[in-house]
Amino acid sequence: MKPINLDHYDTLYENLQTEYTARFPRSGAAQQRAVEHLLDGGSHTARQWAPYALRITSASGAWAEDLDGYRFVDFWQGHYANILGHNPTLIRECMIEDLQRGYGMHTGLLEEREAEYTCQLAKAVCADQVRLTTAGTLATMYAIMLARAYTGRTLVLKISGGWHGANPLALKGVGKNSRGYDRVDSAGVPDSTGEELIVTPFNDCDNLRKIFRSLGDRIAAFIFEPCLGAAGFVPANPEFMQTARELTAQYGTLLILDEVITGFRFCAGAMHSLYGVKPDLATYGKIIGGGMPISAVAGHNDIMQLASNRAGTKKVMFNGGTFSSLPLALLAGSTMLSYLSEHEKEIYPRLKAKGQTLFAGIEDAFTRQGVLAYCMGRRQPAELQGSLGAIYFPSQADYYPASAEEFNDPILAGATLREQALKLGLLLGGVNVVHGLGAISDAHERAEFEVVYQACAAFAEQLRRAGMA
Ligand SMILES: Cc1ncc(COP(=O)(O)O)c(C=O)c1O
């Protein structure tokens, strides 16, 4: 099968936008009203797309409904937080009960739930100590501050494409510019921050060794995701994970694993447990809040103690924030963690099997229409397979991107086609994907997969009609 011919791409995309604006006029009008005072119409870049994002009126399980009354199968699922689907009864009911007895909203006072929740989390991820905050961005920021304080060093090593939230301490090399993945990603972040950050490609052990040989004794922390979101969810290969652990230990650098996406996504705990590797610190978010805002830094006692009131002059100002440990969030998070740990043996194999079925089905749907498309997530080693995936359009048969650089290349992996046209094409077919797909929840079943296959087939048909396949 031949790869996609991108020559007629602009016409295809224009036609899709026309069809989309005709199908979803109410969301279009809502966007126009929104931009009057809400910058760009929404408060998170990832929730916006061209020509405008749909406005949701309800969401349940695998589905969401928009303002124009269409239902769609959703793979964004609360930025990948909703592992049981949207608004699961289990969580909703316990929150309603709490509110009905007059509790749950913020008090700003200590209560037992917080200790119970952190105990649950610490046990599940095998950490000595945990401190909570409200966003993954803050958790990664505090983890880096802890590492700098602990080591007395400044440099931080990260992965190209690695996203740790808009945390200014790690905001370099997330996206690509003409100089590659080696620049500060935001205005307003001083050049000195960029100088303190070193960027290395994912799964490249040779480069990692080279960096540690030349700068290892100046690096406070090496931070990375066990499964790189920006690369379509490529997992760290075991050799890379092992090398990272060995080099950081050898040079006195702290290993921080950012498990904001991966925590409780592959098992009822940390993804790093699948590698048999223990980081010095790890960050969690998304799933651990059960749909409410909780994030955490968890790690080794000696390091975490620096955030304690007893740390004296070395104290790291790690305050969870006004809304940290919101009672309802602790309840939702704790209910979620209990459920996942009690049902670990059924849920995770089921999610893995669903992933393999869906990824293969998507590839088949495209193949039957003569379109070469693959699904990231399908070809991982069995122990690292899971429920995260991304469709891409390879430049040749048997091409599997291994890094953010490759996955986001418009030619090698059809990145523009994926981010723009596939997004609209699948929405028109009743499916919401982000960066090519997203996260399968336990609420996604065969019926939803059928909708996806039909949407992929219809999009493939549009590619053929446009002379691109
Ligand atoms: C790996 C990773 N780290 C950190 C963050 C930041 O989390 P939040 O958006 O909750 O601040 C994200 C968010 O998508 C993430 O994917």
Image: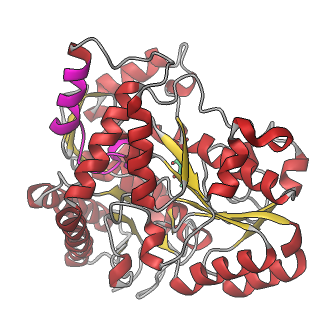
**Relative to residue 239, is residue 462 drawn left or right?**
left
Start-end of magenta stretch: 75-98
Residue at (39, 61) in percent of width and height: 269
What percent of the width, then of the height, locates residue 382? 32, 83
* Relative vertical location of residue 322 with respect to residue 383 in this rendering, above or below: above
Q: Is residue 377 visible?
A: yes
In-front residue for pair 362/311: 311
Height in image: 202 above or below 168? below
> Would you say 449 lies left or right of 146 here?
left
Which percent across, then down, holds residue 317?
A: 74, 36
| For residue 395, side relative to residue 446 (left or right) | right
Taking the spot 23% from the left edge, 36% from the top edge, the residue there is 91
Front residue (pair 68, 466): 68
The image quadrant where one finds the C terminus is bottom left
Residue 105 x %, y %: 38, 17
> Percent position (x, y) of residue 166?
65, 43
At horizontal 81% and vertical 78% (from top left) the residue drawn is: 212
Q: How is the image coloured?
A: secondary structure
Q: Residue at x 55, y 13 (%)?
A: 37
Quadrant for residue 392, please give it: bottom left
> Which residue is most to the left?
447
319 drawn magenta: no
| The one of 236 and 434 positioned closer to us in this rendering | 236
User: Is 93 above or below relative to 415?
Assistant: above
